[in-house]
Amino acid sequence: MSWGSIATWRMSYEGMVEAKKILSQGGNSGDAVEKLIKEVESYPYYKSVGFGGLPNENGVVQMDASFMDGNTLAQGAIAGIQDVKHAISVARSLSKRHYNSFLVGEGATQYAKLHGFETTNMLTDRAKKIWEKKKKQLQTKALNPYDGHDTVGAVCLDKCGSMAVGTSTSGLFMKKPGRVGDSPLSGSGFYVDSEIGGAAATGLGEDIMKGCLSYEIIRAMGNGKTPQEACDKAVYPFIKKLKQRYGKAGEFSLIAMNNKGEWGVATNVEFTFCVANEQDPQILIAYPGNEETTDIQPITKEWLDKYEKRIKKPID
Ligand code: ASP
């Protein structure tokens, strides 16, 4: 049996290298998902996940995360958790409980503290500076205050055929205190069933929720579609529908992998992602294509160099 992994954005690459070590040596998909996401949560220059994540309107970093086991369908999720280093680990721990498996706000933070999860101030000096700058700009200019958000979402398949999915994000920059996105919501931000496959989302949560897009992809794969066909079928007509009936559609992207390690993505914006299955992890870039499918290309060195500069650019 082969293994595989797909995850959102360039930022998941280093984590996928770690996940590969676990999966290629016969390790468990849940461990691989958690490890991959912890790597992203730890890196301060990824400003939409974990340590270094951008704060809400009040300058507080509030994170959402989820974990799902594709064998048992067990799920754990947290929303609006504060001061906890690895939101994904808290979500995974909650997935082992039949009751109280989705905790929000103070309850989520209390649970993490009580159960010995590492706590720390998640607001880095850099994130604080970005927040202060944005606050000032917002006083004089009509800007989109929500610029700067992304989720790490990862689906892993292990050699035993077990699958798991996880998500972690600090959500929308400048969000209202208590705002929750799609990432901890089953069927919207994530879903996995080892008999079929898994999916995860990133982008404007408020719109992803309107289509329960992760579950729709699983449903299409369950009806015999390949992951790419399932992504195309679930996402592109929905974008059209949203534009027609709601008047607009925010930016979002979905990833999927089936239980054979085949994968697909759909997006309405430039979207990088990482994938590995029996090969070394690679970074690819996707664009919305013509004919309701996705145009996927290898990433260029130029793109990667620019990205590196952008994420480390001094804040003036
Ligand atoms: N989906 C996340 C949210 O709405 C943000 C993102 O992935 O860009 O909170």
Image: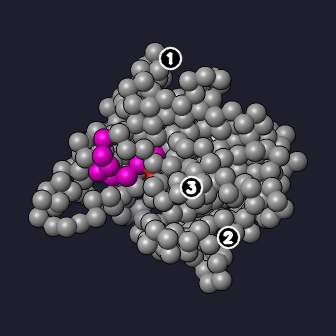
What residue would you read off at disc 2?
Answer: 232
Above or below: residue 44 compared with residue 277: above
Residue of label 3:
201
- Name the spot of residue 200 as percent of width and height, x first: 61, 52
- Specify start and end residues of the magenta stretch as a single range: 169-177
Crowd around label 1: few <14 · some 14–19 · many ≥20 (10 Å)? few
| Left or right: residue 71 compared with residue 115 | right
Mark 2 packing: few (<14 Cα in 10 Å), some, or many (20+)? many
The quarter holding residue 43 reads top left
Taken as a whole, is the magenta stretch helix, strand or loop?
A: loop
Q: Of the two numbered discs 3 and 1 on the same chain, state the one appearing first in sequence.
A: 1
Point out residue 128 in the picture as x, y percentages from the top left corner: 24, 45
Its colouring scheme is one colour
Instruction: Residue 115: give its label.
Output: 1
> Which residue is more in the foreground, 5 or 217?
217
The answer for how far apart the CA atoms under marks 3 and 1 are is: 28 Å
Q: Look at the numbered disc 3 and say if its residue's Cβ is closer than 8 Å to ligand 1.
A: yes
Quarter location, residue 68 = top right
Q: Amino acid at mark 3?
A: Ala
Residue 302 vertical placement versus 79 (above, below): below
